[in-house]
Image (tube, rainbow, N blue to C red):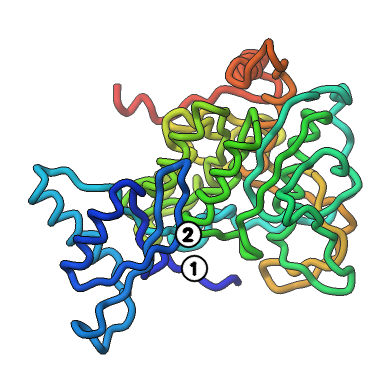
Amino acid sequence: MPDVPEDAKPDELIVDLRERPLVEAALKDLGVIATRDGEVEPFDLAKLTLTYGLSMAPDLPFIMEIDAVLFELRRRFAARCGGWVPLLGKNRTLSNQFGAYPQTQSQGDFDPVQAARPHTTGADPATGRGVRIGVLDTKLYRHPDLEGHYETPAADSAFDLPDPGTATPWENGHATFVAGMILAQAPAATLVVRDVLDSNGRASAWDTVVELAGFLDDGVDVLTLAIGTRAQDGNCPLIVQRAIERLSPHMTIVAAAGNHGGIPGIRNGLTRTSPTWPAALTGVIAAGATTADGTRAPYSPDLPWVTCTALGDEVVSTYLSGKVTLRSGDVQDFDGYATWRGTSFATATVSGAIAARIRPGEVTAAGAFRSALAAGDVVKGFTWKDEQTFA
């Protein structure tokens, strides 16, 4: 079982780049030293690393209660500025599994299973030509079915398959699986893959927005985010919201709804009704998963912000070749393909279906999504079953 990740980096604070001097001055008044530790100019975001001034707290060299710092900053700004506060956020943890703290412990912890090469979807090999699909995920490993269909940042252009004699964490094949699902719908599309998730399928919110900024220069039509987070306060990490707001005018964003739809009760202060971010943000296409018979998969959320569904249960796609360490610790041999389940893979199918209907210069991604919904064969509209409770 993977180690439990921290909710957020305890000594890091994310602020608006333009408001950074105000925040630094307020931190100084609190006896906190703020070290500038990075900027994302397209999103006007800055990261600060916090420490106590040694003269004021010699026995406490590091800030360990970021929530207390945020509370005091917000209180002071609101009191002095008529309720206004600058953008202040924690550097939260995001995941592709939606199953580890701070996300809901869910039914989303599914292991891939070795499978035979899948049957083709019958899509015209020219489908998706001229369309660019962004993917933010784990590293993409080489696979013969994917060659010639993807781009990666120059520094990470070669992702060789793991050594067949060395076991590789199961999470490492996530992007490879997602890529195969997209290309099954749009074989001629170009995937623009940026990696942010580690071998445990996790990334900080800051690292995530740094990579998201890169898509602004990549000319992508559709951005695939099979990652997300849920917070005990129910709110989207502010920096993720800022990034999505800046990206949305330039591309259509499809995000996974999460795999927590079937959990009972409350875990870590979260429930099956907790929103998944960025999927639940306005303007984002939130993709849920169905089983082979078209019904909602039991782990897929039944919530009003889910936009659509696609097959995501027991699907087969490209995967790693060699020995893979599963969640249980067992090692299984894979030969390039696997069966897997989750809203991540429904998300990939939705992105691919949109790409298949885009006609550069004629049909936009937004128009292609409407067309895919109207067709109803691959992508289906979602109706919230609990809506009558508000009647």
Left/right placement of residue 209 relative to residue 121 reads left
Left/right placement of residue 208 relative to residue 134 reads left
Amino acid beneath label 1: Pro
Q: Position of residue 171 (x, y in %)?
A: 68, 60
- The secondary element bearing badge 1 is classed as loop
Question: Is the residue marked by circle 2 packed among few (<14), some (14-19), or many (20+) residues within 10 Å?
Answer: many
Q: Quadrant of the N terminus?
A: bottom right
- The residue pinned by badge 2 equals 93
Residue furthest to the bottom: 59
Q: Position of residue 115 (x, y in %)?
A: 85, 51
Is residue 163 at all visible to an observer of this figure? Answer: yes
Q: Position of residue 323 (x, y in %)?
A: 84, 68
First along the sequence among labels 2 and 1: 1
Which image quadrant is residue 62 in? bottom left
Instruction: Relative to 280, say whether 7 is above or below.
Output: below
Q: Do the numbered discs 2 and 1 sit on residues whose CB atoms are within 8 Å?
A: yes
For the residues marked 2 and 1, what is the alpha-carbon distance in whole angstroms?
A: 8 Å
Amino acid beneath label 2: Thr
In the image shown, does 299 or 327 lie closer to the viewer? 327
- The secondary element bearing badge 2 is classed as strand
Q: Residue at image x 62%, y 38%?
A: 224
The disc at residue 101 is: none
In the image shown, does 324 or 215 lie closer to the viewer? 215
Is residue 288 at all visible to an observer of this figure? Answer: no
Q: Where is residue 245 in the image (x, y as percent from the top left)?
A: 43, 34
Please count the marks in the image.
Answer: 2
Question: Is the residue marked by circle 1 packed among few (<14), some (14-19), or many (20+) residues within 10 Å?
Answer: some
In the image shown, does 372 or 139 lie closer to the viewer? 139
The disc at residue 5 is: 1
